[in-house]
Amino acid sequence: MKKSPPKFRSQLITMTMVTCICSVLVLGITLILIFISSFSKNAGNDMKFYLESTTEQFDLRMQYLEDIITDLRHSVEIREFFDDGSLDSLETSRLLSYNCDLFSSRNMVDSSYPFVERLYLFNNYGKYASCYYYPITLAARDSNDRIYQDMESSFRKSGEEFSYATEDGQLILCMWIYDETMNPAGTCLVSLGTDSINRIFSTSRQYDDSFWSVLGLHGVPLIGNTDKMPSEVMSGISTEKREGTVSTARHLISSRGSGFGISCCIGVPNSTVYDSIRSTIGLFTVVFFLVLGIVAITVFFISYSFTRPLKTVADKIKQFGGGSFDTRLDSFGTQEFNDISVVFNEMTEQINYLITQVYEKQLLAARSQMRFLQAQINPHFMFNILAMISMKAGLCGNTEIQKLLSAFSKLLQGKIFRSGEILIPLSEELELVEFYLYLQSNRFSGKINYEIQCSDGLEQVKIPRLCIEPLVENAVSHGLEPKAGNGKILVSIWRKDDFLWIRVEDDGDGFDVEEWKNQRGQSTTESEGLHTHVGLSNTEKLLHIFYEDKAVMNVESQTGKGTRVTIILPPDSGEGKTLCGM
């Protein structure tokens, strides 16, 4: 039995669905890959930020400890304890408690756990002083004193710069205290609470196979779950002394070095990054296949409905071929099928007329005409017409599908996302000044001291932006930085006779004012290699441009004694804005 050829309608529906589903699959897979790449990158950045913020929290506490040691080195009262031992231990302990301020918020972890719990000072004359965060009994204090004396004695004999020990839930750090000539003036033993350190790194426990550690000199572990730290990671940290966040083959690791030879390290498996987005990827995939199913069903019903006229025409032709010459086709919604319907109906009407009317009157002519019509209306003729119409129908169908995909693509497409002021409040300028001075003070390890004095009620006074900070920067760069020893900067602001007075003075090296005035008129090439004090020159130009001759800037300086710069601003800014009468 000869196999029947496949139906055109079935082929057209199958081809349309395959084309649509393949297009949606390619689009969906592309979106999933983009989604995975983007979310993996974001999750990796989030994990990197978490690791860096954790090590930063530990470093901030260590910075607090460094500030304590720096303050102790520069304390005049405690210096007597180190220099000749004339200050008794009780008074030294009182001063020590005041200077350290173990109850400061900088010393707290989660607002209730102190980072530094105890601190002992030993001079070179056998005296010591201490301060505690937690109150203890006299008997306990005596016991602790003996323990710390033994540790201090062992530390002196070791000759090390730093040493570490763990005792009763404490991480004890031993270090030397140096005087201004960098000679050992005594020793300091600091007790760090291990509970506080554990709480800083506690969030890492939510990740399987995560690890953290606080390391001493030469990468020696002091505290942490180093049993989970891979050996290659430990060896890399101790030998390379790396800082920052790096990604190895298996782990994302963040390490940071602090003072006193201490560093910290925290790491999580790289798989954690993908675990954090797995559920989201699963949901996205489910939604995608749900949309794919809806698209497939929709395309099927649209194709089925669109190709229904083909089945109707084929059925009518079969009926006509079976002898039902009164068969009729209804009108269709498309022009091509509607033309077929008209021609088909006219043909069947003509055949019926010939059979019922002419056959009885002219049988021979009717039979001859009938054979003629049958010869004309043969299967090849009908299938040629259907082939022509099917091509046009296919073109119409593809156009609609293309429009649907285009609209869907456009629906999926997305769109990704102060001006400078001349006048600013005095408080904002002073914040900038204080920030700069704070950075420089830390940069030179307490060599630079500073004080900012501002009369009450002037915080919202408007002044030109950056008219004080360059003066302070000039004082640091040309006054205190080249000076041997410590120095001080004093910034004073007050109001007198409705004028705003601003003064920046330092006790630095000073400079020749007349030489500076001569250099102001030189070009950049002519003044190259000279100390041109650009901050002073720029501020002078700013005041002249903004106030013309209404503002005064006076520079006083003596070599080796310091510099004083005074600015007097008028009540009116020149733009109708009151400066001092606000």
Image: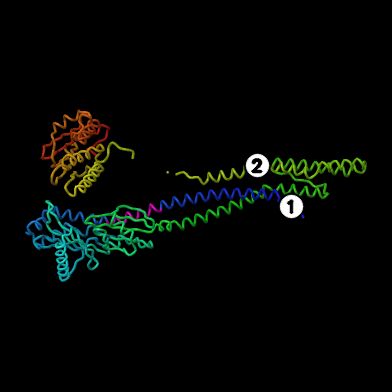
Please indicate whether residue 28 sits to the left or right of residue 569 in the image.
right
Considering only order in the chain, which callout, 2 or 1, is on the residue closer to the N terminus? 1
Residue type indicated by callout 2: Leu
Q: Residues within 10 Å of mark 1 (few under 14, many from 20)?
A: few
Please rate how many residues cluster around mark 2, counting C-alpha atoms within 10 Å: few if below 14, some from 14 to 19, many from 20.
few
**350 relative to 98 in the view: left or right:** right
Please state the horizontal and vertical placement of residue 546, each as a whole percent of the image. Answer: 25, 32
Kind of element beneath mark 1: loop
Q: Nearer the viewer, residue 383 or 102?
A: 383
The image quadrant where one finds the N terminus is bottom right
Please give the name of the residue rendered at 17% of the width and 53% of the height, measured from the top-left corner. Answer: 70
Q: In this picture, which residue range is highlighted in magenta?
A: 43-58
The reply to whether residue 105 is in sight is no
Horizontal and vertical percent position of residue 427? 24, 43
Answer with the quarter of the image where residue 53 lies: bottom left
Q: Main secondary structure of the magenta part?
A: helix
Residue 265 on the magenta segment? no
Q: How is the image coloured?
A: rainbow
Report the amino acid beneath label 1: Ser
In front: mark 1 or mark 2? 1
The quarter of the image holding the C terminus is top left
Residue at x-position 68% and y-position 43%: 393
Does residue 149 appear in this view?
yes
Instruction: Mark 1 and mark 2 in contact? Answer it, CB < 8 Å.
Output: no
- Above or below, 365 relative to 550: below
Q: Which mark is residue 4?
A: 1
Question: Looking at the image, which residue is at 8% across and 59% down?
Answer: 87
Q: Is residue 415 left or right of residue 21?
A: left
Residue 380, image x and y in percent?
Answer: 77, 43
Badge 2 is on which residue? 395
- Name the element at disc 2: helix
